[in-house]
């Protein structure tokens, strides 16, 4: 395993720098948004609706773009496509690094909405496909956990920096980190010898499902694709085994709940406990430290012993507790306690990615990871449409009853559906072989 992770060294450095720049602005963006749209107020429906609209548009764009980018990386290589999100992520950060007044905020808003369609989902999709190219099946769960842990470590570093920097300096440092990530990726990350090279082979006569050498289980193998995957091809992939189908449903409901939580949480804390930039940074710091510790330490220890399926159930249970505890927060310190639940909930993503990765061959990793990211993006489209008006309603004076965390509780119920679906999930659930 050490050799496999060592082969990912440059990718991990790139991911760390990318995440430092992306997450450094999270603690300050609420204050910047409120100052630009509703100066001097703790509640702002316009800010909530604009944030929800941005998430919906971004999710819709990622739903279309990410599977296509993932599939193109199977043909042209992971590194070539990684340059796209690495470069685009610089633009919105540079705008607010220059100025945070209202006109610049709207320019940032438009740029962020457009570039995030590619940069957010595609970066994770392509990086995970890169990891799958480099690491054998038996070690992928641990490798995915290490990669996610490094991303979370970037979250930690970015949050710490934001805690001590001014707002303008935060965006300037974030921009420099994003530029450094793009330059480092171009200079040092090496192309894999599998994702790109295998797709250049003219093997049009492959069967839809290649027979497995093991008599215990047959794994679906898709033929190499020479164009962007159609909707029917993605549906065929996701229905080729009940494991894929369950993974898709779990991903959808978990992402629905998590996106709903992200949509509502910061504005809920602003209205309920008058949180400021530093308190947001403290909360996110707990979140990121616990998540990094979990992925770098607990995932390598628990995944080989429990298996991805059992660990997924435990992680989803933690995710449910995470959401429900936020919704009933009765004091300013309760959100800090709820944030500690991320030590379990953060493992949902690596478990799902590892499960689906083992079901396809090396030349389909980009497509399958893109499909899972696309499903998550679908939830990211729907979730703001539901949770944005719900959050604005229950934070306003016209709420039908006094429960400001009601939208957070609804997000917890969405995650509960994912938990129920994961309980009976088994790794051997593959449909009979057919051509």
Image (spheres, rainbow, N blue to C red):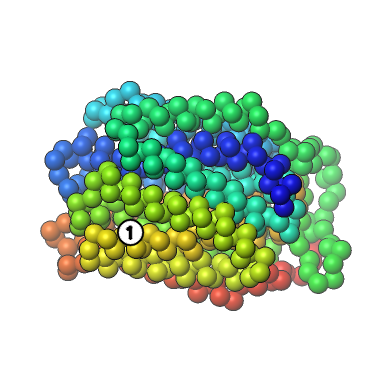
Q: Secondary structure at mark 1?
A: helix
| Residue at position x 77%, y 42% in the image | 194
Q: From where the camera sits, is residue 276 visible? A: yes
Q: Is residue 93 above or below residue 346?
A: above
Coordinates of residue 185 in the picture (x, y in percent):
60, 31
Q: Is residue 221 left or right of residue 276?
A: right
Coordinates of residue 251 in the picture (x, y in percent):
52, 60
- Dividing the picture into quarters, in which one does residue 411 lie? bottom left
Nearest the camera: 373 or 18?
18
Q: Is residue 333 above or below residue 98?
A: below
Q: Which residue was labeled with disc 1?
A: 336
Nearest the camera: 98 or 1?
1
Q: Is residue 7 left or right of residue 321?
A: right
Q: From where the camera sits, is residue 352 visible? A: no
Q: Is residue 409 left or right of residue 120?
A: left
Nearest the camera: 117 or 257?
257
Coordinates of residue 302 in the picture (x, y in percent):
61, 66
| Residue at position x 45%, y 67% in the image | 318
Nearest the camera: 9 or 427?
9
- Dividing the picture into quarters, in which one does residue 9 lie? top right
| Residue at position x 31%, y 55% in the image | 265
| Residue at position x 50%, y 52% in the image | 292
Would you call the spot at circle 1 few (<14 residues within 10 Å), some (14-19), or many (20 or more)? some
Coordinates of residue 290 in the picture (x, y in percent):
45, 56
- Dividing the picture into quarters, in which one does residue 398 lie? bottom left
Image quadrant holding the C terminus, namely bottom right
């Amino acid at each position: 395993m050490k050799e496999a992770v060592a082969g990912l060294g440059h990718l991990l450095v790139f991911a760390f720098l990318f995440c430092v720049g992306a997450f450094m602005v999270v603690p300050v963006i609420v204050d910047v948004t409120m100052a630009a749209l509703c100066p001097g107020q703790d509640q702002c429906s316009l800010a909530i609706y604009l944030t929800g609209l941005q998430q919906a548009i971004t999710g819709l764009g990622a739903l279309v773009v990410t599977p296509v980018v993932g599939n193109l990386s199977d043909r042209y290589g992971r590194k070539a496509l990684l340059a796209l999100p690495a470069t685009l992520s610089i633009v919105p950060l540079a705008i607010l690094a220059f100025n945070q007044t209202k006109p610049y905020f709207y320019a940032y808003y438009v740029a962020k909405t457009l570039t995030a369609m590619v940069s957010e989902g595609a970066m994770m999709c392509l990086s995970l496909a890169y990891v799958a190219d480099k690491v054998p099946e038996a070690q992928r769960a641990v490798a995915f956990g290490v990669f996610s842990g490094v991303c979370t470590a970037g979250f930690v570093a970015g949050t710490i920096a934001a805690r001590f920097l001014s707002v303008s300096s935060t965006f300037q440092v974030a921009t420099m980190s994003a530029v450094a990530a793009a330059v480092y990726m171009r200079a040092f990350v090496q192309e894999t010898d599998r994702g790109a090279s295998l797709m250049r082979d003219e093997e049009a006569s492959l069967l839809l499902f290649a027979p497995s050498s093991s008599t215990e289980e047959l794994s679906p193998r898709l033929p190499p694709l020479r164009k962007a995957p159609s909707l029917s091809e993605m549906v065929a992939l996701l229905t080729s085994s009940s494991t894929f189908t369950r993974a898709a449903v779990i991903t959808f409901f978990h992402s629905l709940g998590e996106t709903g939580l992200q949509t509502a949480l910061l504005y809920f804390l602003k209205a309920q406990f008058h949180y400021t930039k530093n308190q947001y940074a403290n909360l996110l710091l707990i979140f990121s430290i616990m998540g990094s510790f979990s992925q770098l330490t607990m995932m390598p220890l628990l995944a080989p012993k429990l298996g991805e399926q059992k660990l997924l159930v435990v992680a989803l249970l933690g995710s449910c507790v995470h959401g429900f505890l936020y919704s009933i927060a009765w004091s300013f310190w309760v959100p800090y306690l709820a944030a500690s639940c991320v030590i379990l909930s953060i493992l949902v993503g690596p478990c799902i990615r590892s499960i689906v990765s083992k079901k396809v061959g090396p030349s389909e990793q980009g497509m399958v990871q893109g499909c899972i990211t696309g499903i998550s993006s679908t939830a990211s489209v729907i979730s703001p449409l539901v949770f944005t008006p719900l959050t604005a309603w229950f934070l306003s004076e016209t709420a039908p009853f006094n429960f400001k965390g009601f939208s957070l509780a609804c997000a917890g119920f969405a995650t509960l559906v994912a938990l129920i679906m994961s309980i009976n999930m088994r790794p051997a659930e593959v449909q009979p072989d057919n051509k």
